[in-house]
Amino acid sequence: MRDLKSLLDIAKRKYVYDQTNSWYSGSETYLSALKDELAEVLEEIPKQRICHLEDELGDILWNYLNIILALEKESGIDMHSIFNRAVKKYEQRVSTIEQGGSWLGVKEKQKKMLEEEQSKVKKG
């Protein structure tokens, strides 16, 4: 986890720099790069070149972190909330299938709960 923290710290430094450049177009900058990196991962998988695949997967992680940093500023999302939601979501799903339940069933319940949460936000 220390490596993830270090990478995030570097991404934060780079994010500050990116905002001073004419080519920067907010989160779209990183979303576009993420699409390119996903294609590169797909190209690397059949080649079975582990170091290249790991490098490309690192690029995906890099762009993902930069997307979050940009959207924190643009949309007011919170990185910690993203990670907390992901932990809760996938703990529920994995626990459900471990107990013989349906991944799709718990996924539908979660979608309904998310819609309820959103409707409360709209009303409040």
Image (cartoon, rainbow, N blue to C red):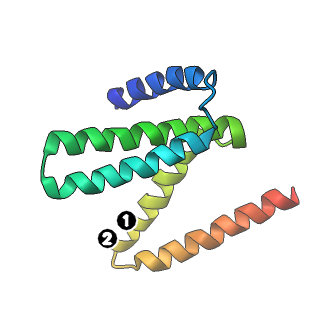
Q: Secondary structure at mark 1?
A: helix
Is label 2 in a helix, a strand or a loop? helix
Q: Amino acid at mark 1?
A: Val
Answer left or right for 97 relative to 12.
left
Q: Quadrant of the N terminus?
A: top left
Q: Is residue 80 visible?
A: no
Q: How many marks?
A: 2
- Vertically, is 13 above or below 118? above
In the displayed structure, does residue 10 sit left or right of residue 57? Answer: right
Contact (CB < 8 A) between labels 1 and 2? yes
Residue 92 position within the rendered picture, expressed as x and y whole percent measured from the top left: 45, 64
- The quadrant of the picture occupied by the C terminus is bottom right
Q: Residue furthest right?
A: 123
Out of 10 and 37, give the one closest to the viewer. Answer: 37
Image quadrant where residue 28 sits: top right
Residue under pointer 1:
94
- How far apart, in angstroms, are the residues tagged by discs 1 and 2? 6 Å
In this rendering, position of residue 81 left or right of residue 95 = right
Residue extending farthest to the front is 22
* Residue 22 sits in quarter: top right
Pick the residue in front: 70 or 90. Answer: 70
Question: Residue 17, image x and y in percent?
Answer: 56, 20
Residue that label 2 marks: 98
- Crowd rating for badge 2 (residues with CA inside 10 Å; few <14, some 14–19, many 20+): few
Residue shown at 37%/47% (left/top)? Answer: 37
Q: Residue at x 55, y 26 (%)?
A: 15
Whether 88 is drawn above or below 93: the answer is above
